[in-house]
C-alpha cells in the first residue's frame, strides 16, 4: 500500500529554494519522492534514523550529496517531509 506524502508549507518553501538552486536535481528529486511514496524502505533510498538533536526523524538520500529529512508515521501510512538540501544543510 502506498504511503501519503505530507508537504507542509515550510517544506514547500524549502523545496522551491532547493529546486531553484539545483535545477539539475529536479528529475532525481521527483524520482526519490515517487519511490518514497511507493516504498520508503527501498534500498536505493538509504532510509535511516537520525540521532542527537534530530532524533525521531529519518533521512533518505536523493544523491550522495543531497538528503530529505522526514517524519515516518507507519500507523497512518504518512510521511511528513521536513527538510531538503545538502548533507550539511539538513543535519
Image (spheres, rainbow, N blue to C red):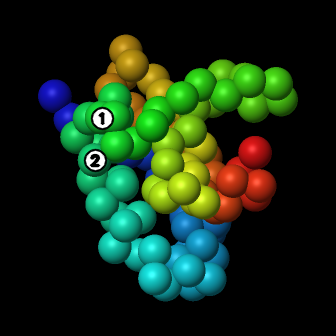
- Residue picked out by circle 1: 42
Quarter of the picture containing the N terminus is top left
Whether tag 2 and tag 1 are in contact, CB under 8 A, the answer is yes
Q: Is residue 82 left or right of residue 42?
A: right
Vertical arrangement, residue 31 with respect to residue 25, above or below: above
Question: Hey, which residue is sitting farthest top in the picture?
Answer: 75
Which residue appears at 74% of the width and 24% of the height?
Answer: 51
Tell me the CA gap for discs 2 and 1.
7 Å
Residue found at x 75% / y 45% = 91
Which label sits on residue 35? 2
- Farthest front residue in view: 64
Q: Is residue 52 above or below residue 30?
A: above
Instruction: Report the disc number at residue 63.
Output: none
Name the residue located 20 percent from the left edge and 35 percent from the top edge. 2
Residue at image coords 41%, 75%: 26
Residue 45's image quarter?
top left
Residue extending farthest right: 53
Mark 2 lies on a secondary structure that is helix
Q: Is residue 80 visible?
A: yes
User: In the image, residue 41 lies at what x, y percent?
Assistant: 34, 29
The residue mark sitting in front, 2 or 1, is 1
First in sequence: mark 2 or mark 1?
A: 2
Whole-percent x, y for residue 30 in the image:
34, 64
Residue 55 vs residue 62: left or right?
right
Dot 2 surroundings within 10 Å: few (below 14), some, or many (20 or more)?
A: some
Label 1: which secondary element: loop
Does 34 sit above or below residue 72?
Answer: below
- Residue 44 in percent (x, y) is at 34, 43
Assess disc 1: are there few (<14), some (14-19) or many (≥20) residues with their C-alpha within 10 Å of its C-alpha: few
Give the side of residue 70 with respect to residue 37, left or right. right
Q: Is residue 8 visible?
A: no
| Residue 46 shown left or right of residue 34 in the figure | right
Amino acid at each position: 500500500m502506498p504511503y501519503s506524502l505530507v508537504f507542509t508549507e515550510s517544506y514547500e518553501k524549502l523545496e522551491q529554494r532547493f529546486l531553484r538552486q539545483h535545477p539539475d536535481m529536479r528529475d532525481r528529486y521527483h524520482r526519490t519522492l515517487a519511490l518514497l511514496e511507493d516504498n520508503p524502505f527501498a534500498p536505493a533510498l538509504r532510509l535511516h534514523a537520525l540521532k542527537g538533536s534530530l532524533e525521531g526523524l529519518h533521512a533518505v538520500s536523493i544523491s550522495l550529496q543531497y538528503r530529505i529529512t522526514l517524519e515516518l508515521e507507519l500507523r497512518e501510512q504518512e510521511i511528513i517531509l521536513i527538510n531538503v538540501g545538502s548533507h550539511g544543510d539538513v543535519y
